[in-house]
Amino acid sequence: MLNKPMILNFTPNNFFFTPIPCTDCDGKKYSKEHNDFKILDFSIGDILSMSFNELSKWLHDVQQCQLSTQLKFSLNQIDAFISKAIELKLGHLNLNRSIPSLSGGELQRLRLVRVFTSQLNGLLIVLDEPLAGLSKIEKEIIYNNILTLASRHTLLIVDHHSIFFERATQIISIGEKSGKQGGMIINTEQYIKTQQADFLLPIIESPKTIQVRVENKVYNYKGVDLCITMNSMNLITGHSGAGKTTLLREYLPQHFDKYTYINQKTLTGHNHSFVITILDIFNLTLDLFSKKFNKDKSFFSNHSGAEGVCPECEGTGRLVYGNDNFDRVIIQCKDCGGSGFRKELKKYRIQGKSICDIWTMTISEALEFYSTQSKKITSILQNAQDILLGHLQLGQLVSTLSGGENIRIKILKSLKTTTEIYGIDEPFKGLNNFEIYTISKFFLNMVRNGKTLIVVDHEEESFKYFSKHIEIINKDGWLIEK
């Protein structure tokens, strides 16, 4: 009101407030004057706020009116998009819905709507994990649409789901592992056989339950009323858009104190955010070198302003030409080989390795090196390897990580906090059966250490590892167990 911050140098985030609809426009984003301009009793604000189900009826009514040829064509295009969205179980969305508020499954299907309604033929279409984040019914709908698409186009599908195995003209398997140990064509029959093995883990049952009841309006929901089992692995499922992400992101933080929500969104950082820094082992590494050679830590650092910075790229390891995002060219710095360190640092070695060598190591390789140097670093790297991050390079930019890698690093970082209850959104997305088993084993160890896990996911292979399975529905605005 005073146009002055209440607290200097502080910007409140979603942990401190919940957005509510504007009382002047009722969330429609248009001034009241626009209500005077209507088509078949609805203003533009009304139309954009309608659910796709309601909008489809309105479009059909408008199409019955006398229209120009050009307008008919435009309405037909909109109608085709809305009809396909409804078919893909997105009828509850509206055109005013913000993209960040969508669940992973909703966003996935919205992108597929554009592909399925395309008028073009004879294209090569690449679908990257089209079934990820979807319930069983939604997967079947998408699968049938993909079969229809295949009659007009050539499809290249990147996916682990066995539903594609029988109908695929050709199956190409790449492996055997990740990172440096991947990227090779492997025997498909052997790979499928390996994935069909029956992986099992013990189930930890807990008698302690807690009723989570929060009454607070968030988006179109009034509140939540669920029973969670403590000190165990809880699985949350339900059709896409039922409110699973809202439950984890908005409601559970209002009920639990020592709670952390973890999703696939990119880790925040800057030009010097690398795997080695985000895992908090860079300073520990600098300590090793500074003590070994009796020099200041700045001498071995590639951070901006430090002595060890490569003078050519100023520690970023990259040279950027051009200012515009579309015209920029980024190349690796030849002087430092992309590490950001001065060349002179290569002569300072511990166990035959310089800090420049460490920068190019994978986590698995670094684990062997640090095992004789630092118990603390070894423990961090062992956890990273256990949660399937062994292929990452220590000097890899955080901005290049996948969604699943982001989730796993966030979990590792939260283990250093006082967090007791974890809300994890789709940790198994894009993983094969063995990888799902490996991540579940890591989760089981967290439970053994007194943690409570509340996981949202649709990968059926993961269901058997959870002690409690909760399918939620939206009943009159309340998120409850089915």
Image (spheres, helix red, strand yellow):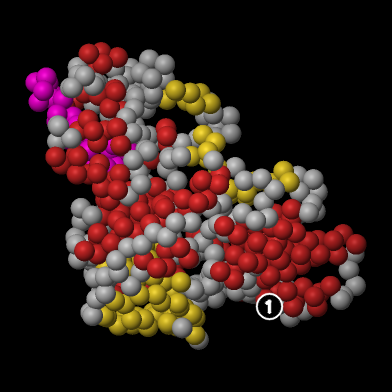
* Residue 271 visible in this rendered orientation of the protein: no
Q: How many marks?
A: 1
Of 299 and 186, nearer the camera is 186
Quarter of the figure with residue 247: bottom left
In the rendered image, residue 288, in percent from the top left (x then y), is placed at: 14, 29
Tell me which corner region of the image, top left, top right, bottom left or bottom right, holds residue 384: top left
Which element carries disc 1, helix, strand or loop? helix
Q: Residue at x 31, y 58 (%)?
A: 441
Classify residue 358 by image quadrant. top left
Q: Look at the image and say whether residue 291 sits in the magenta stretch.
A: yes
The residue shown at (29%, 66%) is 202
Return the x and y of residue 479 as percentages of the image width and height. Answer: 44, 80
Q: Position of residue 481 (x, y in %)?
A: 42, 82
Mark 1, residue position: 54
Q: Position of residue 209 (x, y in %)?
A: 26, 80
Amino acid at dot 1: Glu
- Within 10 Å of disc 1 (Cα), the crowding (few <14, some 14-19, many 20+) is some
Residue 75 in the image: above or below residue 395: below
Tell me what residue is drawn at x 49 percent, y 81 percent.
Answer: 474
Q: What residue is shown at x 49% (from left), y 73% (from top)?
A: 238
Residues in magenta, as a range? 274-296
